[in-house]
Image (cartoon, grey):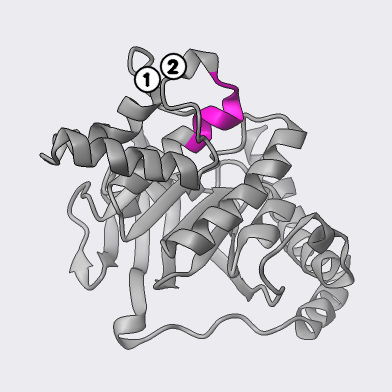
């Protein structure tokens, strides 16, 4: 698609979300830069990234491989430190990991020697919640993620999708204000991934948690997100912020709609050139 056609496509779509303000804003990332040293070489992964998310919003972040998406998420989570810039959650500076932020990784990080129920209850045990209350809450969360009846199973007895549901339940047990998800469905087969996207939509709507979801899949970004933040190739910068005006709840039929196709085409027109540049850099 030529630049002029891409601009016309952008004009035909709903405008990007306006910055949130006041108590409605939960996450604020302001002018964040991250640089690494590679011997004598300085590599800039993120360059002046600014992103906001409102309470209860589902924000997806999409970009080419190596653009710094996961690095951004880890900075928000407090697992990495920005070289410059500021990150705040609920008005408080992020200075390290905290219980107000929960992380779900691409691979389910469950304890293989614990039952699924004990895995989900583990954060509550650490927090000093009574054993009976922790068990009851774990069972509520297993019901929420569709794992009722698997409380006594062990991680090795579950499929990859079921393990990710259990990992999500364990993270939700912490009652985080902000749920951070780093390509959690990337290792799943195509059919399971589609089902997990629908399940996550349902779980998010029932829990009301604010979500920042990293993906390289445009369809996934559009299907899940209230907004899609588009990042450039390295160094990662925000090149667009698109509000997704598709009705909820969303289903498989949503992906077949003309509106869904328009969003996909617009985002691909932005990402195609960035992906090509990223490949050139890797060579």
What secondary structure predominates along the stretch shown in magenta?
helix
Q: Residue shown at 14%/41% (left/top)? A: 129
Q: Is residue 17 above or below residue 189?
A: below
Nearest the viewer among 277 and 91 is 91
Residue 104 makes an appearance in the image: no
Residue 152's image quarter? top left
Distance (Cα) linking label 1 and label 2 = 5 Å
Mark 1 touches mark 2? (CB < 8 Å)? yes
Residue 38 placement, left or right of 189? left
Question: Circle 1 sits on which residue?
Answer: 115
Residue occupying image coordinates x 60% and y 38% = 185
- How many numbered discs? 2
**Circle 1 sits in a helix, a strand or a loop, which is it?**
loop
Q: Nearer the viewer, residue 178 or 82?
A: 178
Left or right of 9 on screen, residue 51 = left
Which element is circle 2 on?
loop
Compare marks 1 and 2 and give the one earlier in the sequence.
Answer: 1
Q: Label 2 belongs to which residue?
A: 154
Q: Which quadrant of the figure has residue 126?
A: top left
Within 10 Å of the Cα at label 1, are there few (<14), some (14-19), or many (20+) other Cα atoms? Answer: some
Q: Which residues are magenta?
A: 158-165
Q: Is residue 181 above or below residue 267?
A: above
Residue 193 percent coordinates (x, y) = 68, 39
């Amino acid at each position: 698609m030529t630049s002029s056609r891409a601009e016309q496509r952008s004009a035909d779509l709903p405008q990007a979300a306006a910055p949130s303000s006041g108590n409605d804003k939960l996450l604020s990332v302001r002018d964040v830069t991250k640089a690494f040293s590679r011997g004598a070489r300085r590599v800039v992964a993120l360059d002046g990234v600014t992103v906001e998310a409102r309470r209860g919003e589902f924000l997806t972040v999409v970009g080419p491989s190596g653009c710094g998406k996961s690095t951004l998420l880890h900075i928000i989570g407090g697992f990495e430190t920005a070289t410059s810039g500021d990150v705040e959650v609920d008005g408080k500076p992020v200075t390290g990991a905290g219980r107000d932020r929960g992380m779900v990784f691409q691979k389910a990080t469950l304890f293989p020697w614990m039952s699924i129920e004990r895995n989900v209850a583990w954060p509550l045990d650490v927090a000093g919640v009574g054993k009976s209350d922790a068990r009851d809450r774990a069972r509520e969360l297993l019901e929420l993620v569709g794992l009722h009846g698997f409380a006594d199973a062990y991680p090795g007895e579950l499929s990859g999708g079921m393990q990710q549901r259990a990992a999500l339940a364990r993270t939700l047990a912490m009652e985080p204000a902000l749920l951070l998800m780093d390509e959690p469905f990337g290792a799943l087969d195509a059919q399971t991934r589609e089902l997990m996207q629908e399940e996550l939509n349902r779980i998010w709507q029932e829990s009301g948690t604010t979500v920042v979801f990293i993906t390289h899949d445009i369809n996934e970004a559009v299907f899940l997100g209230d907004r899609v933040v588009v990042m450039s190739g390295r160094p990662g910068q925000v090149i667009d912020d698109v509000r997704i005006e598709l009705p909820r709840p969303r289903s498989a039929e949503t992906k077949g709609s003309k509106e869904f196709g328009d969003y996909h085409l617009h985002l691909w027109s932005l990402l195609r050139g960035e992906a090509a540049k990223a490949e050139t850099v890797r060579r």
